[in-house]
Amino acid sequence: MVGDSWTHKIARVCILPLVNTPVTPNHLTVLRLLTGLAACACFAVGQWEWDLRGGWLWLLSAFLDRADGELARVGGKSSAWGHKFDYVSDVAVTALFFVGAGIGLRHGWLGQWAVLCGLAGAAGVVAAEILAERIDQAQKDTGEKAYPGFAGFDFDDVLYLFAPVVWLGWQMPLVAGAAVGAPAFALLTWYKLARLRRARGAS
């Protein structure tokens, strides 16, 4: 299914100069992964100057996540391996955000509990992403998503907000909330998958 969110449309225009070049979607995915990992490392330092740098790297990484898929579609360079590489990179970077942010908060009022909260949030993200991918694959024939977007935004466009959250110093409530919310969201996604399988089995 071709993405039609605002960020997909912007990325589609930006990658046009790359269509007939040796640059492949996997090159962009590698860059997306590296910038995402660098952003998470910056967040782990726990200093505002590094949070500022990490935020810009995070935004670039999130945009490259759109750009690699658009280059694959527009340039006719889609592949099963490329899709899997993109998927694994997305899950890893999103999960490691919470790990990095949790480590960066270790000197705050939560102390080492912040690191544990980050790990719990990361585990929930990984579980939810895996289950959501199974739902998407099960509904591949209809093009429906586990969590559809709205008003021109994809569900995972919320990741762009992580950068301003960090810049504003609000990562403590985000990480603490994710420690509970991400596993709960994973359970909700599991329930949706189980219900979908029951419905398809019955039909």
Image: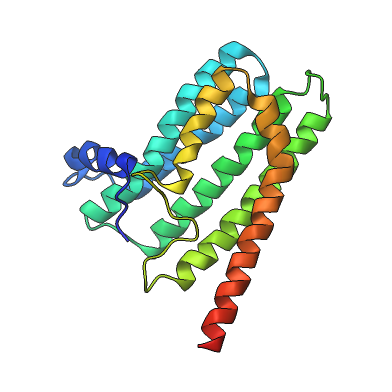
Residue placed most toward the observer, 50 or 140: 140
Q: Is residue 167 left or right of residue 153?
A: right
- Residue placed at 44% from the left, 41% from the top? 157
Q: Please say which color scheme the image uses.
A: rainbow
Residue 144: image x %, image y %? 41, 65
Vertical placement of residue 91 versus 164, above or below? below
**Residue 51 placement (x, y as % from top left):** 57, 19
The residue positioned 55% from the left and 49% from the top of the image is 91
Closest to the observer, 71 or 111: 111
Please tell me how many numbered marks the rendered image carries.
Answer: 0
Outermost residue, front direction? 151
Which quarter of the figure has residue 48?
A: top right
Image x and y of residue 199, in percent:
55, 80
Taking 168 as reference, is 70 left or right? left
Is residue 170 placed above or below 178 in the rendered structure? above
Work out whether 87 lies above or below 160: below
- Relative to 167, does residue 126 appear above or below in the rendering? below
Q: Is residue 37 visible?
A: yes
Q: Note whether residue 34 is visible.
A: no
113 left or right of 60 in image: right
Q: Which residue is located at x 26 percent, y 42 percent?
A: 9
Image quarter hosting the N terminus? bottom left
Residue at screen point 44% across, 61% down: 145
Quadrant position of residue 11: top left
